[in-house]
Image: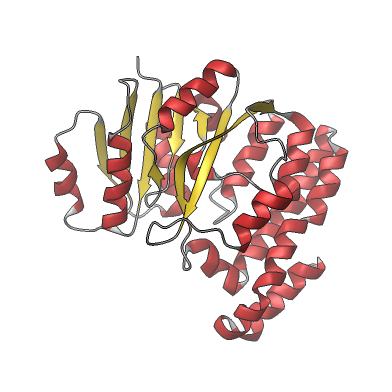
């Protein structure tokens, strides 16, 4: 029986999506399937998938646009195998991706999530490390890159201090994700919300340093657009305060304290204020300043 459901929620650039699909098709083994859920209306896409003639690939097109979280949940509904990957439609699997995941799960069979090593690339596919990724690597990511298993309050503290994971590269235990799903009231930070659900439910994270995935970071993206408008930080402030209350209720008081500080999100807002003055005007700057100071909006 197949073990890995590789899910590709698609909307946007056709060429980048096709490159992402091709990167999946070179994976070794016969224990996986690719499922693409198209949330757009590009006319040539259905025909391209039909031309692949590959029984390992399923293609669906939504009748109505579901949005980011809605399409994530649609993908999760379609998953039937033991583990799933919800990769970005512009990211790339390296040929060794599933090999690395298989080996990590053999070492940590009870892990609910696996975070492999990631290469960050720009819109042209060239390796890049901007400020956000440098901060992730130097300040927030564990100093010991693994392989190792992380869980409980120590992991919650680490992620509330700064989310160093690369969500599209993670392999998840399917039943765990299907139990909680993605919050549709969150537009950017829904991945961290899901991870918190899983941690509070007792799931663990296996980390391995072997690089097997390319995460594409664009200058213009949903997250950067919402950041310039201030919506990202309003959402983050609400999430971290809610998360702190849940962590307190769970008895993880140190993690709750870290969540209430939402330090990494405030630092992110501070670094974006100069650019926001040009792109978002005073309203965007005001929203970011409120977030930096921790003042209730």
Q: In this view, does 227 lie above or below 50?
A: below
Front residue of this view, candidates 217 and 78: 217
Give the residue displayed 65% in from the left and 30% down from the top.
146
Q: Which colour scheme is used?
A: secondary structure
Is residue 203 visible to the viewer in this orientation of the structure?
A: no
Residue 134 x %, y % = 64, 56
Residue 282 x %, y % = 66, 85
Q: In which quarter of the image is the N terminus?
A: top left
Residue 252 x %, y % = 83, 35
Front residue of this view, candidates 247 and 110: 110
Q: How many marks on residues? A: 0
Horizontally, residue 273 falls left or right of residue 154, namely left
Q: Quadrant of the C terminus?
A: bottom right
Horizontally, residue 297 falls left or right of residue 197, namely right
Give the residue displayed 42% in from the left and 48% down from the top.
88
Is residue 195 visible to the viewer in this orientation of the structure?
A: yes
Residue 126 x %, y % = 42, 58
Give the residue displayed 12% in from the left and 42% down from the top.
51
Horizontally, residue 2 falls left or right of residue 262, namely left
Q: Is residue 160 above or below residue 127?
A: above
Q: In this view, does 110 lie above or below 211?
A: above
Front residue of this view, candidates 125 and 281: 125
């Amino acid at each position: 029986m197949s073990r890995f459901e590789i899910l590709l929620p698609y909307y946007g650039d056709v060429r980048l999506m096709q490159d992402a699909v091709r990167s999946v098709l070179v994976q070794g083994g016969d224990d996986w399937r690719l499922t693409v859920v198209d949330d757009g209306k590009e006319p040539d896409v259905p025909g391209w998938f039909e031309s692949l003639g590959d029984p390992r690939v399923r293609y669906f097109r939504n009748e109505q646009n579901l949005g980011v979280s809605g399409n994530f949940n649609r993908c999760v509904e379609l998953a039937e195998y033991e583990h799933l990957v919800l990769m970005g439609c512009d990211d790339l699997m390296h040929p060794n991706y599933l090999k690395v995941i298989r080996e990590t799960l053999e070492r940590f069979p009870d892990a609910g999530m696996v975070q492999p090593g990631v290469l960050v690339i720009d819109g042209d596919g060239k390796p890049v490390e901007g400020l956000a990724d440098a901060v992730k690597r130097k300040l927030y990511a564990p100093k010991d890159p693994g392989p190792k298993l992380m869980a409980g309050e120590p992991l919650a503290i680490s992620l509330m201090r700064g989310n160093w994971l690369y969500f599209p590269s993670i392999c998840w235990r399917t039943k765990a994700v299907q139990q909680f799903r993605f919050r549709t009231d969150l537009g950017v930070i829904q991945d961290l919300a899901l991870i918190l659900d899983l941690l509070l439910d007792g799931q663990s994270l296996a980390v391995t340093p072997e690089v097997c995935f390319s995460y594409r970071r664009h200058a213009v993206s949903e997250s950067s657009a919402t950041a310039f408008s201030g919506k990202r930080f309003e959402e983050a402030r609400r999430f971290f305060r809610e998360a702190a209350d849940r962590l307190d209720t769970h008895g993880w008081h140190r993690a709750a304290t870290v969540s209430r500080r939402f330090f990494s999100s405030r630092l992110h807002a501070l670094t974006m204020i100069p650019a926001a003055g040009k792109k978002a005007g005073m309203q965007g700057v005001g929203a970011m300043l409120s977030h930096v100071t921790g003042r209730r909006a």
